Amino acid sequence: MATAIGAALTTRPSLQPHKTHLSRFSPNTARFPFQHVSVSSLRVAIAGAAADGRAADTSAAEKKEEQPFKVLLALKTQYNDGILVIDSPTSKYLLLDSSRNVHSMLNKEDLWTGSYWDEFASLPSVIPPGPIALLGLGAGTAAHIILNLYPSLHLLGWELDEMLINVARLHFDLSKIETPNEHGGRLSAFVGDALSPDVSVEGGFAGIIVDLFSDGNILPQLLEEETWVELSKKLMQNGRIMVNCSGRDKQEYYRERKIAPMKLSRSWTENSCIKTLNRALPGQVCWKLVEETDCENYFAMTGPLPDLETWSGSVPDKLSSKVKDWKLCE
C-alpha cells in the first residue's frame, strides 16, 4: 500500500482508523462501466494488492499497451463495503462498494473526464444565480469541473460516508476547492443523508445535481414520486434539478452476461427513474441519453426545455454539441 489511511487521517481525531480490506475485491467479478482506462490493468492491480499488499506488475507486453496502475488505498467502512483508490500516471480513480464501479476520477492535467460527470457542467448556464447542491458528492469530480468553469459559484455537497470525504481530501484534492478561490467560489462539504429534509438553504437552491447510487444501483428513493416532489420544493424560482438516472431498465442483465444490450427505442420510457420523475412533475422534465464505450446513462433535468442554440453557445466547446441532445419528455 502506498498510503496508510490511519496515519494520513491523524489530523481528524474523531475518526478511528479503518482496517484495510482487499479480499472482497475479486478481479473476476469487477466491473468498471464509467471510465476510459484499461479494465485489465485495474484488475491486475487489485488482484496483486489483495495477494501481497502492493500493486502487481504486468508483463512487458502489457506494459507497452496499458498504463501502470497501483492501489493507493483500500478499506471498508460502515457505509461502503469497499473503498479503493487507484492511481495511474494520468488519473486517479475511486471505486466503491461491491459493484466495483468507478464513482469518481481526477485527471492530473485535464479536468474533463470524457464521461458522464462532464454533463453536470452544463447546468449552471440554464439556472439563475445562486448556490448549487450536489447530492452524492463522491470524491468531487463534478465539483472540480464546475468550479473550474464557473469559479464564483458556491457548491454544497452531501456525502453519507465521512471517511469517503476524508479520502477525497487526501487523494482527490477536495480540500483545494473547499478553500474559497480568488473569485469567492468554493465547495462546502457536508456529511449526512443527501435526501434529508435538512438539506436546504435559505431562498432555495439555484440547481440540484443528483448522483446517488449504492452497490451499483440507483437509490430506491429516487423511484418514489414523493422524493422528487420534495426535492423540487428546495429550488428557488426557475431553479432546476439535473439527475444521473443510470442506464436503461434491466441493463444489469446484459452486463452480467457480457452481451450487448438489445437496441430498443432509446427513449426515456426505458428508464424507471425518469418515468418516476415525469409522473411527479408532469410536463416539466427533459431527458437525454449519454452513450459511452462501456455503458449508457440516461440524464434528466426539470424545467422547460431550454433554447438549445442559446444553451449551446453559453457552455464550453466540449459541451456545445452535447446539450443539443436534450429533449422534452413527451
Image (cartoon, rainbow, N blue to C red):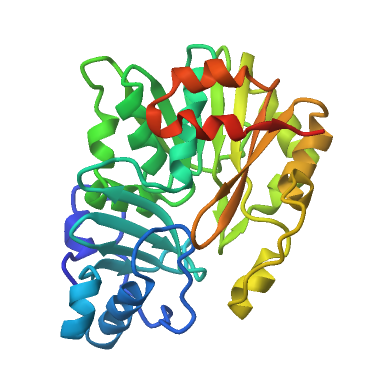
Q: What is the x, y in percent for residue 117?
A: 45, 43
Q: What is the x, y in percent for residue 144?
A: 33, 36
Q: Residue at x 24, y 28 (%)?
A: 179
Q: Residue at x 67, y 67 (%)?
A: 261
Residue 126 appears anywhere in the view: no
Indicate the quadrant where residue 184 lies: top left
Nearer to me, 21 or 322: 322
Q: What is the x, y in percent for residue 45?
A: 28, 76
Nearer to me, 318 or 137: 318
Asked if residue 195 lies left or right of residue 160, the reply is right
Q: Is residue 59 above or below residue 316?
A: below
Q: Residue at x 22, y 68 (%)?
A: 67
Asked if residue 271 lies left or right of residue 153, the reply is right
Asked if residue 118 lies left or right of residue 54, the reply is right
Indicate the quadrant where residue 327 lies: top right
Q: What is the x, y in percent for residue 252?
A: 65, 68
Q: Residue at x 24, y 73 (%)?
A: 65
